[in-house]
């Protein structure tokens, strides 16, 4: 009973994670500029791989492996915002402009002052 | 459908979806008009690779797949941070009219 429940839960989590990853890559291909692509890649992409890691944690019978998978999820939630924030800030500061139909750029004055 | 066969089916479906996602991201790496686009797509490739490793871990039951996934995540994080520093240090971007960017 528990085994079959584990299998069902892991299967659903795997499907959800793969769907999120696929959505993120379609967004990465379709969206118009770097800053909008970053929404797809850093939110949906991270969620996809983290959900699949959670499926691994659910499926394994060993508590050590499950704990390590959850620690991995925690680690990704900690590091991905840092790296994508740093990349967006670096791209903006080095002069990569927004899409021409973007309505608002809060950092515009900041980058002009730096020049 | 029993739990095991449903799991087998969903592992296969996940492999197919992840392969398609990998392909689309590689297209963005090749196409991406500027350097930060390519860096973002490489970061996404690392995330898809972690997904692959986790699905393989579920389907084979090999224990140390988690460690490989965590190490890959660490390497991807450090690479993205290093590339971001590189973008910041290289102050002249490529000509903006090559892509969809604004002047």
Image (tube, rainbow, N blue to C red):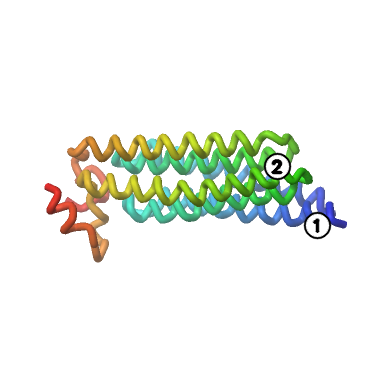
Residue at 12% in and 47% down: A115
- Secondary structure beneath label 2: helix
Identify which residue, A9 or B30, lies in the foreground. Answer: A9
Q: Quarter of the image holding residue A19?
A: bottom right
Residue at 38% in and 52% down: A37
Horizontal and vertical percent position of residue B67: 62, 35
Q: Nearer the viewer, mark 2 or mark 1?
A: 2
Q: Dot 2 falls on which chain?
A: A
**Image side of residue A36 versus residue A17, left or right:** left
Identify which residue, B76 or B92, lies in the foreground. Answer: B76
Residue at 34% in and 43% down: B37
Horizontal and vertical percent position of residue A32: 33, 53
**Image side of residue B54 versus residue A75, left or right:** right
Judged from this view, the residue extending furthest toward the right is A1
Residue at 61% in and 40% down: B52
Identify which residue, B77 or B25, lies in the foreground. Answer: B77
Horizontal and vertical percent position of residue A52: 63, 49
The disc placed on residue A5 is 1
Q: Quadrant of the N terminus of chain B?
A: bottom right
Q: Residues within 10 Å of mark 1 (few under 14, many from 20)?
A: some
Query: For mark 2, what is the residue?
Result: A65
- Above or below residue B64? Residue A42 is below
Judged from this view, the residue extending furthest toward the bottom is A103
- Secondary structure beneath label 1: helix
């Amino acid at each position: 009973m528990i085994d079959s429940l584990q299998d069902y839960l892991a299967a659903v989590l795997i499907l959800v994670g793969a769907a999120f990853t696929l959505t993120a890559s379609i967004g990465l291909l379709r969206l118009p500029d770097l800053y909008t692509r970053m929404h797809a890649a850093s939110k949906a992409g991270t969620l996809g791989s983290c959900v699949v890691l959670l499926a691994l944690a659910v499926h394994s019978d060993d508590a050590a492996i499950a704990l390590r998978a959850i620690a991995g999820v925690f680690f990704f939630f900690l590091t991905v915002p840092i790296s994508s924030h740093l990349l967006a800030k670096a791209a903006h500061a080095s002069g990569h402009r927004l899409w021409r139909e973007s309505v608002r750029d809060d950092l515009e004055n900041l980058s002009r002052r730096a020049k | 459908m029993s739990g095991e066969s449903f799991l087998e089916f969903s592992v296969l479906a996940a492999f197919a979806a992840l392969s398609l996602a990998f392909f689309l991201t590689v297209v963005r790496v090749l196409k991406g008009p500027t350097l930060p686009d390519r860096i973002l797509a490489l970061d996404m490739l690392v995330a898809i690779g972690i997904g692959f490793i986790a699905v393989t871990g579920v389907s084979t039951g090999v224990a140390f797949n988690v460690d490989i996934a965590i190490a890959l995540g660490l390497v991807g994080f450090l690479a993205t941070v290093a590339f971001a520093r590189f973008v910041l240090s290289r102050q002249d971007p490529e000509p903006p009219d090559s892509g969809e960017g604004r002047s």
